[in-house]
Image: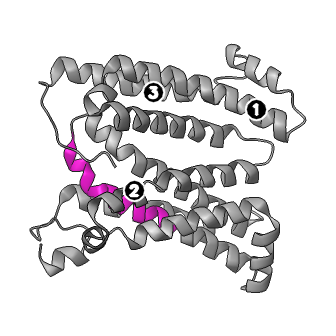
Amino acid sequence: MTALSRKLPWLDRSGRISPLKAAVFAALFLPGLAAAVNLAGGAYGGEPAKQVIHALGLWTFRLILLALLVTPAMQIFKLPRLLIVRRMIGVAAFAYGASHLSAYVVQQHFDFAKVGSEIYLRFYLAIGLTALLILLALALTSTDAMIRTLGSRNWKWLHRLVYAAAILALIHYVIQSKLDVTEPTIFAGILIWLMLYRGVLWTAGAKRATAPLVLACLAIAAGALTMIGEAAIYSLFTPIDGARVFDANFSLIAGLRPGWYALLFGLAMAAAAALRFFFIPLRRVAVSST
């Protein structure tokens, strides 16, 4: 690996431009650019600082999920080259998280004592900061040099903390969403599917984890757990009857509930795996199961 390829994220190990890395690198700037354009154009209305904070935080969580999705995607679709962008997406998630916190500090007029007090007093802010500190640790240890220093085994165990960061970020997201938790619950369903997939991957291997029938079962489990979790959230944290929320899953009057989105996401993965079995010759693909 050349010194230049270590410094420029859009280059491959030989120092040549990687179209995949270049495209992903450029795409990772788009959410931040969109937030800046919306802020400058007045699209955020009367609470621009609050809207910017929300947008940056939302993209932090989306990028965490996207980073976690890389391994299932490359195993299900047999695209091992996707691995080269996983680290980049993970570092971007930390960058957006840091920007999310920085925007909050700006909103508080750089009153660091007040920021510290708010984080101490507000549970969801403390959880969000903890998730960000985990992402910081993962970003700092994302280099090849750190892999050699820590050793591959230790590095993998450390980077599995991304699941803890994802769960904490989700809790932060749910609490700050207050009464309407529909959007974070949809993301929770996808996170549940990702964690179930990793559980099968770690215990039974990639061949079993990517079997269409197994993926279909994971989809059903993720959908059911999302429905139960949504009902529990409403029961515990709102005056709304959780049983009525659960029953709403089986009526289309209010549209599809988050559990159905989780189910459909998982079934889409199962369908993709089935198509792969029909149209792509089976072959062993060595991929990381981190």
- Tell me the residue that label 1 is attached to: 232
Residue at point 17%, 61% (across, down): 18
Q: Are marks 2 and 3 in contact (CB under 8 Å)?
A: no
For the residues labelled 2 and 1, the Cα–Cα distance comes to 31 Å
Secondary structure beneath dot 2 equals helix
User: Mark 2 belongs to which amino acid?
Assistant: Trp
**Secondary structure beneath disc 3?**
helix
Q: What stretch is highlighted in magenta?
A: 79-96
Residue 230, image x, y percentages: 71, 32
Task: Residue 95: say if magenta.
Answer: yes
Residue drawn at 55 percent across, 56 percent down: 165
Q: Give the Cα distance between marks 2 and 3.
A: 26 Å
Quick check: can you spot residue 33?
no
Q: Point out the image quarter for the N terminus.
A: bottom left
Say which label, 2 or 3, has the lower sequence index. 2
* Residue corresponding to mark 3: 266
Left or right for 58, reference 178: left
To which residue does mark 2 refer? 157
Whether residue 237 is visible, yes or no, is yes
- CB atoms of marks 2 and 1 within 8 Å: no
Query: Residue at left 28%, top 19%?
Result: 274
Q: Where's residue 261, x and y in %?
A: 55, 28
Residue 111, quarter of the rendered image: bottom right
The reply to whether dot 3 and dot 1 touch (C-beta < 8 Å) is no
Q: Which amino acid does label 3 sit on?
A: Gly
Instruction: Let me know if residue 112 is in the magenta part.
Output: no
